[in-house]
Each structure stands twice: as structure tokens, then as C-alpha cells.
Image: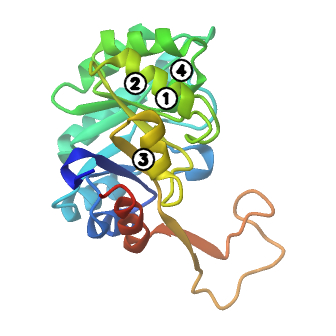
Amino acid sequence: MKREEFKVEVCANGVESCLAAQQGGADRVELCAGIPEGGTTPSYGEIKVARRLLTTTRLHVIIRPRGGDFLYTDLEIERMAADIAVCRDLGVDGVVFGCLKADGSIDKEQCRYLLDCSRGMSVTMHRAFDRAIHPEQALEDAIELGFDRILTSGQQPKAIQGAALLARLNQQASGRIILMAGSGVTEQNIRELHQTTALHEFHFSAREPRPSAMRYINPDLYMGRPGMAEATLDYTTSRRVEATIAQLLD
């Protein structure tokens, strides 16, 4: 493909990763906190600084108040609407969210309300879609509601494993909405993923581990879950973004 024929979005876990994504040629970033939880809404400061520094790469922000499921209370929806308002005030290009009912169907009422809050911004339904009970119906619901795109792994842990469903959904969508493949997308499989699914948008993190600069870390204390590698920090690198993009170029 030519570069203008596809778009890549980098899942950025902070401003440093946003800058690396921009340097590597990404079209967009999805700025997230709480990566071990699948991504949660980043802080005001994180969004504000990212917005100032991203000059050629578009900034999308995940709107997810917690990890876990996508069944939200009225209070959680109120907070999500407030976070969307913050994103609008800061000049964010797009927001990313999704809401489900207890039976696994798309909660169209909640999604419609948040979409109304997001008017003027690009809106992506995130991988709540991958928890939907009937993906074909969930696709039609997302189209009806007016989402711009769906981030999905084809309801599998990794997008390459869900490639068959991604291809079927892409045919069903028939240009009415953008499907973006995400989860486990790397420079090793992105070309195969495109050839198998015919998708033209891809979402990946391109992160690499970086040792902490701390010379002393208390070996008996964890700030999070015991056993986590807290002496290692993961950041997107421009090198991996460039390498992944290169795999799609003719």
C-alpha cells in the first residue's frame, strides 16, 4: 500500500509515548492510563501536555472510568460525560468509549448520550465491542448510533486470531463505518493482518521496556500487584512505530 492508503493509531501510555508515536509517523494516538487494566481515562495534566506537544499526530483519549466490564452506572456515565467535556475544552480530536447492557448487547441509550456529549469530535467504539454477545448486531448498532470507527480484535485475545471475523465484519460494514484492528498488532503480523482482513486502520502500542533509573528499590514492597516488574517502564518507541508502518508499504 501507499502511505496515504492506511492509518495507524498508537496506544500511548503517556506523553513520552505520544511523542515517540508522532516521531515515528503515527496518524493518531489513543492516550490511556491504566494499561494493565485495558486502558482508563488519563489525567487532565496528561491530556493537556499531550495536546500541546502533538502537532502533526491527532489526539484521541479513552473515556473509561475503571477497568473491568463495560456495564456502567448512572454515576459512572456522569463522570464519563464530564471527562468528555474536559477533552473538548482541551482541544482533543477524538474520544474512545463503549457501553454494554448486562446481556452483552450494546447499550444504545448510554452510547447515544455520550455521543451527543462528543459532538464535533471523532468517536471510536473501543473493545467493549469484543465483549458484545452478537458482533454482527453490535456492528449494526454502532453504525446506527453514528460511531466513526470500531476498535476490535475480532473478539479474540489477539487481532490475528480474530482475523476471520474481522474480514466478515469488514464485508458487512461495506464502508459504512471504519473497522480498526487492535490487540497484539506488531511489525511481525500487521501485513498478514491487512492481507487477511482487507482492513486499512491498525492500532498498536510499539512499546519497549526501559529499566528504571532508580538505584535502590525496596525488594519487599510493591506499589501495585505483587510480582509486577516495577523496576521496568514500558514506552512506545519511534523505532518500532516506523518498523511497523514500513511493513505495510509496497
Task: Measure the C-alpha gap from mark 1 to mark 4.
Answer: 27 Å
Examine the rendered structure and indicate whether residue 155 appears above or below residue 241: above
> Which one is in front in this view, the residue at disc 3 or the one at disc 2?
2
> Which one is in front in this view, the residue at disc 3 or the one at disc 1?
1
Residue ID for mark 2: 170
> Which one is in front in this view, the residue at disc 1 or the one at disc 4?
1
x and y percentages locating residue 173 in the rendered image:
35, 18
**Amino acid under label 1?**
Leu
Residue ID for mark 1: 166
Q: Residue at x 48, y 37 (%)?
A: 196
Q: How many other residues sit within 10 Å of disc 3, few (<14), some (14-19) or many (≥20)?
A: many
Q: How many other residues sit within 10 Å of disc 4, few (<14), some (14-19) or many (≥20)?
A: many
The kind of secondary structure element at disc 4 is loop
**Amino acid under label 4?**
Tyr
x and y percentages locating residue 59 in the rendered image:
26, 49
Residue ID for mark 3: 203
Q: Is residue 154 visible?
A: no
Which tag, 2 or 4, sits closer to the chain's start?
4
The kind of secondary structure element at disc 2 is helix
Task: Measure the C-alpha gap from mark 3 to mark 2.
Answer: 16 Å
> Which one is in front in this view, the residue at disc 2 or the one at disc 4?
2
Q: Quadrant of the C terminus?
A: bottom left
Task: Measure the C-alpha gap from mark 2 to mark 1.
Answer: 6 Å
Residue ID for mark 4: 72
x and y percentages locating residue 72 in the rendered image:
53, 20
x and y percentages locating residue 52 in the rendered image:
19, 61
